């Protein structure tokens, strides 16, 4: 429902403001057409019969008047495979990571460890191999990902962190 409201608002408004799940705090990957100019953690709020951790976001039409393009969703230096992709078991990888669960999102997997939601990550740039692997293994993913329900580390989270942490990654 939030996405439909947002999409319609981009056609008729210069500003859009509304309360969203905490996963949208400082997040312009999902609602990207306008500039995110303000994002505040509202903490846990009571709505109807439940407590929900929410944020308040304000978006503004870009100064150019043109809507923003979708953010980069892939890197050529890194390939991310989700466990439900075709031939996942045959995919070569440098790091395996759990992407789902409050206690396990971002957990690096070793050996025969298996989880219901995992990524295989292949590092394609040998010059940046150590830097990329160090970020993937050493970053505090559990603190980074916020959610109302079960934490879920999305591919865009990984791409965003790698882009911010590693100079020259493409």
Image (cartoon, grey):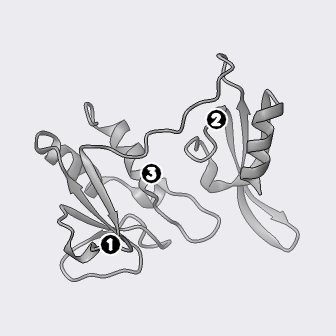
The residue located at (53%, 67%) in the rendering is 151
Q: Secondary structure at mark 2?
A: loop
Q: Is residue 74 found left or right of 19 in the rendered image?
A: left
Q: Tell me how far mark 2 sits from mark 1, CA to CA.
A: 32 Å
Q: Which mark is residue 86?
A: 1
Relative height, residue 62 to residue 141 (above, below): above
Q: Nearer the viewer, residue 140 or 76?
A: 76
The residue that label 3 is drawn on is 157
Q: Nearer the viewer, residue 121 or 41?
A: 121
The mark lying in front, picked from 2 and 3, is: 2
Q: Nearer the viewer, residue 43 or 76?
A: 76
Q: Nearer the viewer, residue 36 or 102?
A: 36
User: How would you rate the neighbour count of disc 1 (Cα within 10 Å): few for under 14, some for 14-19, many for 20 or more?
Assistant: few
Sequence-wise first label, 2 or 1: 2
Q: Which mark is residue 33?
A: 2
Q: Tell me how far mark 2 sits from mark 3, CA to CA.
A: 18 Å
Sequence-wise first label, 3 or 1: 1
The residue located at (28%, 73%) in the rendering is 88
Image quadrant in which the C terminus is located: top left
Q: How many numbered discs?
A: 3
User: How would you rate the neighbour count of disc 2 (Cα within 10 Å): few for under 14, some for 14-19, many for 20 or more?
Assistant: many
The residue located at (43%, 40%) in the rendering is 72
Sequence-wise first label, 2 or 3: 2
Image quadrant in which the N terminus is located: bottom right
Q: Residue furthest right?
A: 48
The part of the image, by quadrant, that contains residue 32 is top right
The residue located at (41%, 80%) in the rendering is 116
Q: Tell me how far mark 3 sits from mark 1, CA to CA.
A: 22 Å
x, y percent for residue 13: 82, 30
Q: Secondary structure at mark 3?
A: helix
Q: Residue furthest front?
A: 86
């Amino acid at each position: 429902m939030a996405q439909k409201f947002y999409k319609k608002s981009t056609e008729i408004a210069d500003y859009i403001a509304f309360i969203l799940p905490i996963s949208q705090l400082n997040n312009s990957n999902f609602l990207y057409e306008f500039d995110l100019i303000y994002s505040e953690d509202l903490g846990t709020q009571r709505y109807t019969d439940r407590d929900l951790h929410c944020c308040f976001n304000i978006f503004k039409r870009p100064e150019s008047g043109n809507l923003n393009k979708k953010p980069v969703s892939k890197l050529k230096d890194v390939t991310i495979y989700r466990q439900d992709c075709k031939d996942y078991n045959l995919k070569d990888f440098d790091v395996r990571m759990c992407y789902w669960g409050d206690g396990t999102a971002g957990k690096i997997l070793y050996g025969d460890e298996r989880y219901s939601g995992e990524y295989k990550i292949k590092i394609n740039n040998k010059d940046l191999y150590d830097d990329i692997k160090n970020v993937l293994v050493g970053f505090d993913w559990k603190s980074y990902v916020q959610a109302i329900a079960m934490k879920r580390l999305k591919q865009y989270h990984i791409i965003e962190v790698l882009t911010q942490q590693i100079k020259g990654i493409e």
